[in-house]
């Protein structure tokens, strides 16, 4: 057994796990999550995670024999490669690492295709991939929904009930609702309390989930290939309400790993041992990823309005919060909400 390090890089930061090459499914020897600082480059949390895991290996008097980092886009890969310095790093397309780990654990179908539904902090990435050839059939990304947006919606709801929270606290409450049905939020300044239930969070997220289900149907129609299943990835899919709502709308078998936000890092562990250096890219059957953009089609406009109504309320709530507090508790200006309308296809 060799000790290897798998790292997943994203807009929100990096996750890393240190384990033996044949045991990525077991609890790791060590792991960490490094958030991306405001204004920081994507490579900063990656190499901070690597530094921490190297320290963990040194304390155990062990040597890391392989190191792989997964990236969602070429720009992230270039930034990490440019900053690698003396690190011998394998850079891997994130969907490939996800497929590799799902295959290792027996969750991936032997044939056909799957949709990798990756709901992270900054948005949703859906990749339609062939299970046998590891080929990308199509990829789309939307910033209409994501963990950051859900945190903002939750802050808005709490503010309506007189409880002001900062971003880390609202994220903590949202993550707690993945395992607990009820969470009590406390305003540190006033001492006021507000109760939030899992159903409340599901209601806040409903517009975005409905949008993503339409997004899924559009991808299937465009590719002409019916997937065998949809794989739920990213920390946001830990919430049972989101999984149940999505399963009811897409009518596809659900594949869900108990640790969805570490699937990419676990796949990187496997590939770090198999491919010690260089870049590992996936073949694309179709031209690159597309981002959801606003157009004039009436059906797209209707779908855009549905999402805009939900997020528009968020903006109003944030404005009200700004009147009550001259500055957020984390000392930074609030991140503006980005509203993006769906692209071509039968939404609604």
Image (spheres, rainbow, N blue to C red):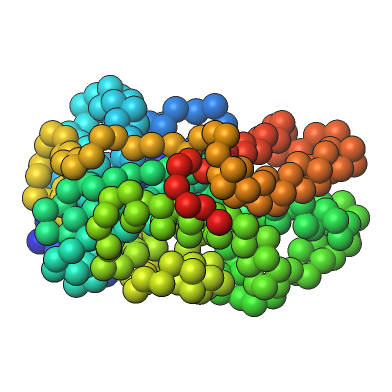
- In this view of the protein, which residue sits in the foreground, 93 or 293? 293
If the image is split into quadrants, where does the N terminus sit? bottom left
State the image coordinates of residue 33 (x, y, percent, origin top left). 44, 50
Look at the image and tell me in which quarter the C terminus lies. Answer: bottom right
* Front residue of this view, candidates 52 and 131: 131
Image vertical order of residue 110 relative to residue 307, above or below: below
The residue at 57%/34% (across/down) is 296
Q: Nearer the viewer, residue 345 or 170?
A: 345
Identify the residue shown where x is 52% and y is 43%: 342
Position of 321 with respect to 240 (left or right) is: right
Q: Is residue 111 shown to the viewer in this render?
A: yes
The residue located at (22%, 60%) in the rendering is 113
Percent coordinates x, y for residue 82 in the rendering: 28, 22
Q: Position of residue 198 (x, y in %)?
A: 65, 72
Residue 83: image quadrant is top left
Res. 18 in view: no
How far across and down, in percent of the image, does residue 109 sit?
19, 69
Which quadrant would residue 192 be assigned to in this image?
A: bottom right
Farthest front residue? 298
Residue at the location (44% across, 27% down)?
A: 41
């Amino acid at each position: 057994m060799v000790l290897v390090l798998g790292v997943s890089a994203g807009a929100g930061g990096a996750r890393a796990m240190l384990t033996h090459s044949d045991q990525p499914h077991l609890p790791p020897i060590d792991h960490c999550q490094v958030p991306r600082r405001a204004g920081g480059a994507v490579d900063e949390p990656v190499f901070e995670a690597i530094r921490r895991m190297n320290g963990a290996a040194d304390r155990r008097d062990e040597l890391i024999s392989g190191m792989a980092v997964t990236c969602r886009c070429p720009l992230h890969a270039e930034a990490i490669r440019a900053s690698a310095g003396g690190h011998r790093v394998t850079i891997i397309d994130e969907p490939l690492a996800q497929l590799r780990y799902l295959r290792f654990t027996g969750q991936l179908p032997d044939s056909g295709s799957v949709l990798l539904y990756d709901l992270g902090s900054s948005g949703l990435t859906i990749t339609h991939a062939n299970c046998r050839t590891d080929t990308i059939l199509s990829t789309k990304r939307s910033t209409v929904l994501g963990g950051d947006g859900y945190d903002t919606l939750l802050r808005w709801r709490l503010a309506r009930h007189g409880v002001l929270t900062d971003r880390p606290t609202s994220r903590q409450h949202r993550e707690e609702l993945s395992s607990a049905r009820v969470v009590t939020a406390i305003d540190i300044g006033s001492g006021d309390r507000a109760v939030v239930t899992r159903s409340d969070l599901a209601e806040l997220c409903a517009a975005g989930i409905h949008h993503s289900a339409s997004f899924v149907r559009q991808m299937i129609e465009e590719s002409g290939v019916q997937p065998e299943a949809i794989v739920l990835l990213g920390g946001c899919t830990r919430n049972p309400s989101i999984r149940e709502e999505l399963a009811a709308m897409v009518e596809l078998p659900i594949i869900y790993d108990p640790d969805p936000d570490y699937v990419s890092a676990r796949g990187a562990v496997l590939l770090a041992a198999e491919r010690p250096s260089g870049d590992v890219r996936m073949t694309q059957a179709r031209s690159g990823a597309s981002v959801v953009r606003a157009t004039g089609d009436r059906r797209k406009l209707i779908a855009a309005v549905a999402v805009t109504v939900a997020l528009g309320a968020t903006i109003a709530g944030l404005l009200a919060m700004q009147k009550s507090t001259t500055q957020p508790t984390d000392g930074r200006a609030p991140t503006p909400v980005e509203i993006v309308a769906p692209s071509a296809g039968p939404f609604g």
